[in-house]
Amino acid sequence: MIESVVSSSGTKKRVVVGMSGGVDSSVTAWLLKQQGYEVVGLFMKNWEDDDDSEYCSTRQDWLDAASVADVVGVDIEAVNFAAEYKDRVFADFLREYSAGRTPNPDVLCNAEIKFKAFLDHAMSLGADHIATGHYARVRSVQTDHGQRFQLLKALDHTKDQSYFLHRLNQAQLSRTLFPLGEIPKTEVRRIAQELGLPNAAKKDSTGICFIGERPFREFLNRYLPTQPGAIRTEDGKQVGTHHGLSFYTLGQRKGLGIGGVKGYQQADGTGATWYVARKDLATNTLYVVDGHDHPWLLSHQLKADQVSWVDGQGPVLGNYAAKTRYRQADAACRLVASDADGFELTFPDPQWAVTPGQSAVLYDGDVCLGGGIIS
């Protein structure tokens, strides 16, 4: 989105940048300053239950962000959104896992924290815009209904993060800048190294922000009760015991503890390759199947609820593309039903391990239309 960096009063427009301590948000701040904006950095602290543990890097991230702000030449402040995060994101995360689904808290964090609590705080600081280091683009278009804002994929499709941003609305997009949407990740690293940023070689963060690199089951055990039950095959044979349905997701292959079950050897003598295929909450049973392409793991359709459309209203029924998980190529699909309560997609090619709780996000070319939670 190209616009003037000077306000109507003749002063530089102010952009508040969410600076996480990572290389992407650091280069974002520098790029905007180069473009002529007045840039202010804001470091968000969203989690503090075990901030001093080996897995939570908040303190180091803050030091990195402050060091970068000094090099780039911008002011930075820290703001604590831990209470909002726990109430708006983490509580929903636990509810979904308790119901046997697999949520994506990064989607909710973007909608509720980074582009709501953060946006509100930035506006109180007199910001004209906010900016983050996400790989995505915003485009302003004129329609019969006036100016509208589209969410687009990043030009670097290998880093595109529009999937995580699909719940953003018109008001949020109208205030948001995504400078990295126009350049490849390799260029971001090059800029950081050329500037001598202290975090130029810092690894990208992975996983859920409040879990970090810690063992997932160990973390969930603190908050959800363990309810062991049977692991069964499609024919009902018990082949093991699970620790609780919350700890498993559809398509999961590792950590099942049932590698060498008798009677399930292949012709070459190797054991079966087990995948989680179904959860039965009523009987607390985890069903597994042998083989990646077992019919239980393949779906030609899905239903989604908790719908959020970028434009504020759903697209017309017809042919689009969809992602049912982040690291997935766009899959051709047809929107066959849509209303305020949800939508339904069909796929000519079966989709693997379509997982309740994850987001189904709809695209028309590079334009992200929005999506919903797979039900």
Image: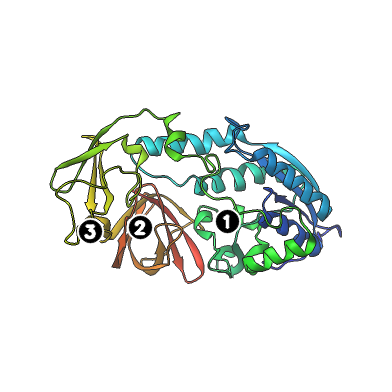
Residue behind mark 3: 294
For residue 32, what is the image quadrant?
bottom right
323 sits to left or right of 180: left
Disc nearest the viewer among 3 and 1: 3
- Helix, strand or loop at label 3? It is loop
Numbered badge on residue 170 = 1
Amino acid marked by disc 3:
His
Q: Position of residue 4 (x, y in %)?
A: 77, 65
- Helix, strand or loop at label 2? It is strand
Mark 1 in CB contact with mark 2 (< 8 angstroms): no
Q: Position of residue 311 (x, y in %)?
A: 51, 59
Q: Count neighbours of disc 2 (C-alpha within 10 A) and say few if under 14, some if 14 to 19, many if 20 or more.
A: some
Residue at point 81%, 55% (across, down): 72
Q: Quadrant of the N terminus?
A: bottom right
Disc nearest the viewer among 3 and 2: 3
- Helix, strand or loop at label 1? It is helix
Q: Alpha-carbon distance for marks 3 and 1?
A: 41 Å
Q: Alpha-carbon distance for marks 1 and 2?
A: 20 Å
Relative depth, front residue between 266 and 119: 266
235 sits to left or right of 221: left
Q: Alpha-carbon distance for marks 3 and 2?
A: 29 Å
Q: Position of residue 256 (x, y in %)?
A: 31, 43
Residue behind mark 2: 338
109 sits to left or right of 323: right
